[in-house]
Amino acid sequence: MKNKIQLITYVDRLGCKSIQDLNSLFKNEFKGLFGGLHILPFYYPIDGEDAGFDPIDHNLIDPRLGDWNDLKDLSEEVDIMADLIVNHVSAKSIQFQDYLQKGEKSEYASLFLNYNTVFPNGATEADLMTIYRPRPNLPFSMFKLNDGSVKLIWTTFTSNQVDIDVNNEIGIKYLESILDTFEKGGVKMIRLDAAGYAIKKQGTSCFMIDETYEFISQLTEKAKAKGIEVLVEIHSYYKTQIEIAKRVDYVYDFALPVLVLDTLFNKNTSSLKKWLEVSPKNGLTVLDTHDGIGIVDVAGEDEKPGLIQNDILDKIVNQMHANSKGNSLKATGSAASNLDLYQVNCTYFDALGRDENAYLMARAIQFFVPGVPQVYYVGLFAGENDMELLEKTNVGRDINRHYFTKSEIKTHLEKPLIKKLKELMIIRNNHKAFNGDFNLIETSEDVLNIKWTNKEHWAELLIDLKAMKMETSFS
């Protein structure tokens, strides 16, 4: 992977109707801004219940967007990352529909996890209460088969996302077939989506257990054999992230978004500095993604302390809600159809109260800390909460999934804030210092000073939080 900023986007939310249109955008308006492109699910269909994360056919690009030849052409312009959705498929998939029709006689019967697969002798109340889940109920949905029988199918996320048995021979071949398709389509890197939930075992949390690590390691080796790098997406306790980083090519730095908010809100760099001392250096840094702003990534776990004290974390969350004028409250937790109750749904610009100076500082911190930066398409334009889309869908995360028009993109790119952001991005992509050594210079808690050095080249960031002033210098 190039040590250059990547863009995270859906194909159809940047004024584009197809992959070919997206290719044109990279050759023109976005030229020089990105070294990589994470295209959020473009499989059939892109407009399911979870914006493409519930594929009916993972090996088929939604025909409305194009085909694998179009993606191959785009891969010649920019390195492509794609999602490998390892945990589930759509309940509308051919495989699951065949199972509903034929039951145990279906060739796909063993592909899907049901209650009895994991609990052949039944489950105790303790077994069920131990399961870690992103929604406030049990991870099962009831399905009626053609013969009239009823099965409890494991559905970690929604009832339209049926979990697969990744240890079963059919499940293994299913995932391998997707890797084969990716290789032919020019995909250079994959993100293992929802990998933490992939292994279920009685008596455990069914999330990031020992067997999960082994599954991730094995799948990573298969991908690397095809020349594909692997990024693992896990929202979890920060020490879990550190452990995962030892086993894969890249992990997300999901702790950074809240740590940056803590730095800017509280004029205090201590928590951020402590994290930078121990954070994985093979991280992809983000401030915003297609999901919410993760709280679990900096919080404590059981009796173990997190990166930010609970009382301070509560104040940060409340400050986000206040800065967004309460709109984030309408999209977070039980206020909307949310899959994850441990995130705040809000654009990063609104989380900062639309403070342009603070926003540019936040991006500068992201670009200067170790890791390869990813910028979400809404964040690229310092986008605001889309309350109209939220009201239309009642899906909390849609508040940060705006559909931009071509005219909106043109207008945003001419804004002074975005011009300054673009200048910073181009420097981050091309300055030789960022391929050298990272130095966190010792300062007081209200000052952040980062310097990169590479032989005679250097790049430095200095932020005075009391004055809310930033300086960047390069040589």
Image (cartoon, rainbow, N blue to C red):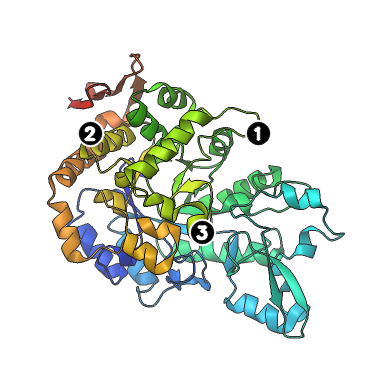
Q: Nearer the viewer, mark 2 or mark 1?
A: 1
**Element class at badge 2:** loop
**Which of pointers 3 and 2 lies earlier in the amino acid sequence?**
3
Q: Name the residue carrying label 1.
A: 302
The answer to whether residue 39 of the structure is visible from this angle is no
Q: Residue at x 38, y 69 (%)?
A: 392
Percent x, y of residue 230 = 49, 48
Give the alpha-carbon distance from disc 3 to disc 2, as whole Å.
32 Å
Quarter of the view holding residue 281: top left
Mark 3 to mark 1 CA distance (whole Å): 31 Å
Q: Amino acid at mark 3?
A: Leu
Q: Nearer the viewer, residue 235 or 445?
A: 445
Q: Secondary structure at mark 1?
A: loop
Q: Position of residue 319 (x, y in %)?
A: 38, 38
**What residue do we see at 35% from left, 20% from top?**
440
Residue 191 in the figure: left or right of residue 464: right
Q: Amino acid at mark 2?
A: His
Which numbered dot is residue 431? 2
Helix or strand or loop: what does disc 3 sit on? Answer: strand
Q: Earlier in the sequence, mark 2 or mark 1?
A: 1
